[in-house]
Image: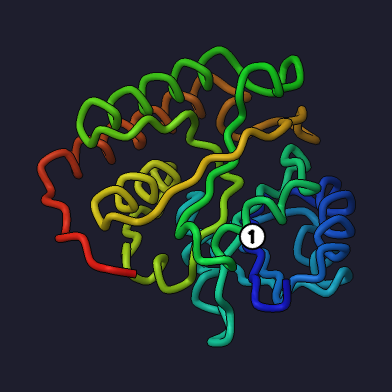
Amino acid sequence: MNTVCVIMPALNEEASLRVVLPQIASLAPGQVIVGDNGSTDATADVARSFGAEVVYEPRRGYGAACWAAMQRIRPDIEVVLFVDADASDDLTRAIELVRPILENRADLVIATRDAESVESGALSPQQRFGNWLATRLMWLRWGYRYRDLGPFRAIRKSSLDQIAMQDRAFGWTVEMQIRALQERLRIEQVSVHYKRRIGQSKIGGTIRGSMKAGYWILSTIGRHWFRRSTPRTSK
């Protein structure tokens, strides 16, 4: 995993980082970057204590934190693994996301939070509905059946550069999936266990957060609806 960079956006996640970062260290990735999205707790100090690089991004937004962290990726990195900082992702499955890319079988691999593998209470009803609606719309427009918008995912670094992410808010995951289809990337989906997070979700844990995320997801789909795909090229 020495050519893999792990990126974690984080906002006041000092407690969960004490759980997540040792698990990531056991994977021995080449680089770990925490995108601190304006935390007021010890998130940055905890991240550094476990050897992670910290990039401070005060502009709030999941995409803003991810984008800021991306600017620090080393030039030798081949694969970027996005992981939530809240301890909800099953990191024992990380190699299953990375391997298809390293073996040149895929460009984007998404960990899907399928119903039978989700811990009770880990996903709110509004999150489940939002995932269903967004993936349904993408299937209707682009003809590919995504099963989830799960943030736990791996992507080839050159493919990440190719899709040129623009979202800086909560449309980050859906934009990446749409752009992957538009750019004809090879996609795989892996069913994983999904756990209840440590602490309260800033998105799914509140009605206001869910509504904000829903707005950004749907507006992102709408913005890309009439964008043309690029011609398929050999890989």
Image quadrant holding the C terminus, namely bottom left
Q: Eyeballing the image, is 148 above or below 15? A: above
Name the element at disc 1. Answer: helix
Residue position marked by numbered label 1 in the rendering: 99
Residue at 39%, 51% in the rendered image: 176
Depth order, front residue of 9/143: 143
Q: How many badges with numbers are in the image? A: 1
Q: Residues within 10 Å of mark 1 (few under 14, many from 20)?
A: some
At 50% from the left edge and 66% from the top edge, which residue is drawn? 104
Q: Amino acid type of disc 1? A: Arg
The image position of residue 155, as x and y in percent, is 50, 60
What colouring does the structure picture have?
rainbow
Find residue 6 and report its image quarter.
bottom right
User: Quadrant of the rendered structure where residue 158 is?
Assistant: bottom left
Q: Residue furthest bottom?
A: 75
**Left or right of 172 in this view: 150:** right
Q: How far across and how far down the image is residue 151, in percent?
A: 56, 44
Provide residue 73's location: percent of width, then percent of height.
56, 78
Q: Is residue 72 above or below residue 225?
A: below
Res. 24 image quadrant: bottom right
Q: Relative to residue 165, is residue 38 drawn left or right?
A: right
Residue 230 vs residue 211, the one in the foreground: 230
Rendered position, 168 above or below 3:
above
Residue at image position (20%, 31%) is 141
The quadrant the N terminus occupies is bottom right
Of the pair 155 and 37, the residue shown nearer to us: 155
Give the x, y percent position of residue 138.
29, 32
